[in-house]
């Protein structure tokens, strides 16, 4: 309008309050440093190095060649949802029908959808820490308040009923579980899960259970909280194809739960994502047909590396809880007089080995670093040799 003046806002001032408040991923932030160096042995990114099975890849190629690349229904291919339901019945002993399954663009999207479905403004979400870096920010994006529940090395980073109850307030609505755990490698067995039930029931908590590492357990079989009495109707179970099947870039996961909760997630999903990638869904049907064979091979490979890395780190004086699942070790480095960031940065600078500072996974991770054994044994042996030199050089700091 004539005579009016407009104050120009710089791009940074155009960000919403939420966008300004979200912190960068501690993992990605650190690995910006890695990208600037050559010859680095990375024990950082949680991406399995095993090949996607040939039949699975071929199913994706066939879909592209034949033009089978159009949208699926918002919930996902019906054939795949039936296959997922059958898989969950066989592997975690929980019965779902196809209407209680939603195919997502990775487990990360499943976490986001689940939180946006069950969290209202101001609700508190309990998150046992150390935990995956995205949980807290996803709670904030859903309008909730993340409440860390610190876990300790002394009890194997297992969530206890005492720690859970102590974190509950009148605003608590959700408990976000992640076992087998990233970054600690801890698992929750049946006995530990049963101890949590009285607290969950007393405070009527909704459970979001991220079980993407469920097939990668090395001492007994995985136990899902959804299989316990009274838990199925209050649990959203999340899983996917990235870790067991090495299908990280295919971006495919799934959620299973009571139909009302899955329907709510689907309504948000249809506006945010439309549907998960069609080619990946078609390939996933073939993946589930081979799940027992694929999972057995993955456990054998990662189990051998687990032993190598755990014994190697322990032998260097970097004590850690023996990982029971996933593909991470979480050794303590505070005894060297260094913070976890100082340890990680110096190790990278001096020996070209990349690990992730434990503080990236929450305040409870300070004093530890995450080492992934989703890489080859030769690289693990070289990394241990370099870490050994580093530890001996800095042992008396």
Image (tube, rainbow, N blue to C red):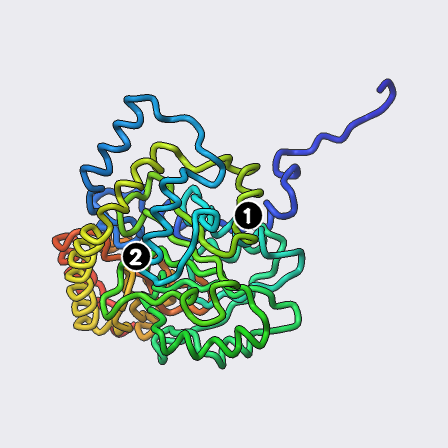
Check disc 1: other Cα within 10 Å, few if <14, some if 14-19, many if 20+: some
- Residue 305: image quadrant is bottom left
- Residue 217: image quadrant is bottom left
Q: Give the camera-side residue of 185 and 241.
A: 241
Residue in the picture at 50% in, 37% down: 273
User: Upstream in the sequence, badge 2 or badge 1?
Assistant: 1
- What x and y, as percent, mark residue 251? 37, 41
Q: Is the residue 259 above or below the residue 232 in the image?
A: above
**Which residue is denoted by mark 2 in the rendering?**
355
Q: Give the camera-side residue of 255 and 381.
A: 255
Could you say whether the residue bearing mark 1 is in a helix, strand or loop?
helix
Residue in the picture at 34% in, 46% down: 83
- On the rendered structure, is 192 left or right of 167? left
**Which residue is denoted by mark 1 in the rendering?**
263
Q: Is the residue 159 above or below the residue 292 in the image?
A: below
Comparing marks 2 and 1, which lies closer to the viewer? 1
Q: Give the camera-side residue of 44 and 321.
A: 321
- What x and y, as percent, mark residue 49? 22, 47
Q: Is the residue 340 above or below the residue 10 in the image?
A: below
């Amino acid at each position: 309008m004539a005579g009016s003046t407009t104050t120009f806002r710089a791009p940074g001032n155009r960000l919403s309050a939420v966008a300004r408040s979200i912190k960068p991923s501690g993992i990605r932030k650190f690995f910006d440093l890695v990208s600037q160096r050559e010859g680095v042995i990375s024990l950082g990114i949680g991406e399995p190095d095993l090949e996607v099975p040939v039949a699975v890849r071929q199913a994706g190629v066939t879909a592209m060649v034949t033009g089978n690349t159009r949208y699926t229904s918002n919930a996902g291919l019906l054939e795949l949802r039936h296959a997922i339901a059958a898989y969950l019945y066989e592997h975690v002993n929980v019965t779902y029908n196809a209407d209680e399954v939603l195919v997502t663009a990775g487990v990360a999207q499943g976490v986001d959808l689940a939180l946006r479905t069950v969290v209202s403004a101001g609700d508190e979400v309990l998150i046992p820490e150390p935990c995956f870096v995205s949980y807290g920010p996803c709670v904030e994006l859903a309008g909730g308040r993340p409440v860390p529940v610190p876990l300790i090395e002394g009890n194997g980073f297992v969530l206890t009923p005492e720690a859970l109850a102590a974190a509950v307030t009148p605003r608590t609505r959700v408990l976000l579980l992640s076992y087998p755990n990233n970054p600690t490698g801890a698992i929750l067995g049946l006995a530990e899960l049963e101890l949590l039930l009285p607290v969950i029931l007393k405070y009527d908590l909704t459970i979001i259970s991220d079980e993407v590492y469920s097939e990668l357990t090395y001492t007994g079989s995985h136990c899902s909280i959804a299989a316990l009495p009274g838990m199925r109707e209050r649990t959203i179970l999340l899983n996917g194809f990235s870790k067991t099947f090495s299908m990280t870039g295919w971006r495919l996961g799934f959620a299973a739960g009571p139909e009302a909760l899955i329907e709510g997630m689907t309504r948000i999903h249809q506006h945010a994502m439309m549907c998960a990638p069609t080619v990946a869904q078609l390939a996933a049907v073939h993946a589930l047909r081979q799940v027992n064979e694929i999972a057995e091979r993955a456990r054998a490979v990662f189990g051998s590396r687990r032993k190598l890395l755990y014994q190697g780190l322990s032998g260097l004086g970097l004590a850690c809880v023996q990982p029971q699942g996933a593909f991470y070790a979480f050794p303590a480095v505070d005894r060297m007089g260094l913070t976890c960031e100082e340890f990680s940065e110096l190790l990278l600078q001096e020996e070209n080995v990349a690990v992730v500072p434990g503080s990236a996974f929450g305040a409870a991770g300070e004093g530890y670093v995450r080492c992934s054994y989703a890489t080859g044994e030769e690289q693990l042996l070289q990394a241990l040799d370099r870490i050994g030199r580093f530890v001996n050089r800095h042992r008396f700091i």
